[in-house]
Image (spheres, rainbow, N blue to C red):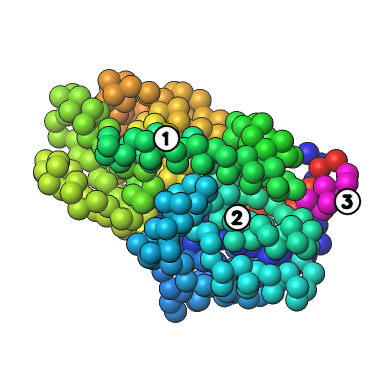
Amino acid sequence: MPHDTLPPQRILWTMPYLPWPITSGGKARQYHLLRCMAERGHRITLLVQSKTPADAAVHAALKPLVDELIVLPRRPLKHPLTLWHAACSRLPLLTSVNGFAPALSARFEALLQSRHWDVVQIEHSYGLQPFLAALQRHRQPFLLVEHNVESELGAATYGQWPALARPVVWYDQWRARRWERQAMSMADVVVAVTDADARKLAAIGGRPTCVVSNGVDTRGFADVQPDAAGQRVLFVGNYEYAPNIDAVEWALDEVWPRLWALRPEARFVVCGHAMPDAWRQRWPDPRIDWRGYVPSLPEVQSQSAVFMAPLRSGGGSKLKVLEALAAGLPVVSTREGLSGLDVQDGVQARVADTADAMAQATAELLAQPDHAQALGQAARQHVTARFDWSAAATQLEAAHAAVRRTARGERP
C-alpha cells in the first residue's frame, strides 16, 4: 500500500475503554499510538465510553496527548437495560454491552456536526454500534480497527461458560459472525494487527485492509538484564481476557507438572490485572508466585530467567510477548503466542505447541543460562529493529491516507 506523508490531521478517535492505566496489551497499543501520533502534531479528540471513571491520573496521562478528552460512563454489566439488550438484541453479547448508548451516540453526532474531521477512527467492531447511524447519516468516511478477529475468540471466551449454556453460546457465535460481516462491510478501511488477520478481515467484509502492527517502547526495556541463572519463569496477562485465563490454566494443569519433573526448583511467577482469586486455592503449590498487577514490568522481568507464553488462542500479535523479547528475556511460546512477530524457532525464541515440548524447552533454557542469554539478546535486537512504536504510527498514518483515497473513490 502506498504511503502519503500526512500533514497534521484532525482526528476523532473512539475507544470502548480508557487506555490508561495500561493493564492490557490493547491499552498499551492505544496509549503508545496516541503518544506517537500526538508527537507528530496530529490534533486528536478522544471519545471514550468507560466502565471506570477518569480520575486525576487518567487526565494527567492522556490530556497532554489530545486536544479534547471526552469520557462517558458505560452502563454497568448487570444493569437491566444491558441485560435486556444482551438477551434480546440480534447483536452479540460484547457489542450489546458496549452498544445502545444514547448519550454516547448523541455526543458523537454533535462532534460530527460541529467540525470537519480529516479522519474518524473507531476501535473494535464491538464498539461501532453507537456511532454507525451518525456515520451513515453524515456520510462520514471512517477507519475501523480490529485487534483480533473477534469471531475466532469464541473457543477461549465460551470455554469459561457452563455446559448448560451451550445453546446460548451457539446463538451468540452466530450473532458475532453476523455483526462482524456487517461492521466490516461498512468501514472505508479496516485495520488489522497482522497480515494473517488482514486477509481474514478482508474476506469477511470485502473492504480494503491495512496492517498496523503492534509495537513496543524499546527504550523502556533497554536496561532490563534478565536473571539468566535464576529459576523464575514469568507470565503476564490481563485476566479479563479469556485467552490469558486459558493460558495459565493449561500451563498449570499440563505444562508445569512436566516441567517440575525436570526442574523441581523452578518457580512460576504469574502477573497481571484482574487475577482470579480462586487460582490460589486451585493451585496452592508454594513454587507459584501469584503477583497480580505489577506497576513496573521491567523490575519483574529483571528477576526472571524465562518468559513462558502458553497461548492457544487470541489472534493478532501479543504485546506481552513483544515486551519480553524487547527485554531480552528468552521466550518459550506456542506459535499462536508468536503470531505476527516473524520470530524463528531457535534463533529469537523457542516454539512449543504441546505441553511436553513447552516443558522440555523451558527446562533446557533454565539449565543452560549462556544459551538462554544468547537467545534473549537475539530477540532484543530483532524487536528493536522491527517493532518500535514509531513504525506502527507510520503504518497508522498510511491507513489514514488510505481512508482519504477511498473516500475520493481512488484505490487505497
Does 339 appear in magenta? no
Q: Residues within 10 Å of mark 2 (few under 14, many from 20)?
A: many
The residue range painted magenta reads 403-410
Could you tell me what secondary structure mostly forms the magenta stretch? helix
Kind of residue sitting beneath label 1: Trp
Q: What is the quadrant of the C terminus in the image?
A: top right
Q: Which mark is drawn over residue 408?
A: 3
Q: In which quarter of the image is residue 178?
A: top right
Q: Is residue 315 above or below residue 70?
A: above
Give the labeled residue for mark 2: 128
Residue 358 visible in the current orientation: yes
Disc 2 to disc 3: CB gap under 8 Å: no
Please state which of residues 81 and 128 is positioned toward the viewer in this rendering.
Answer: 81
Q: Residue at x 31, y 32 (%)?
A: 369
Q: Residue at x 64, y 34 (%)?
A: 204
Q: How far apart are marks 2 and 3 (CA)?
A: 23 Å
Give the labeled residue for mark 1: 170
Position of 49 with respect to 313 (left or right) is right
Q: Which mark is drawn over residue 156?
A: none
Q: Which of marks 1 and 2 is nearer the N terminus?
A: 2
The furthest residue to the bottom: 56
Disc 1 to disc 3: CB gap under 8 Å: no
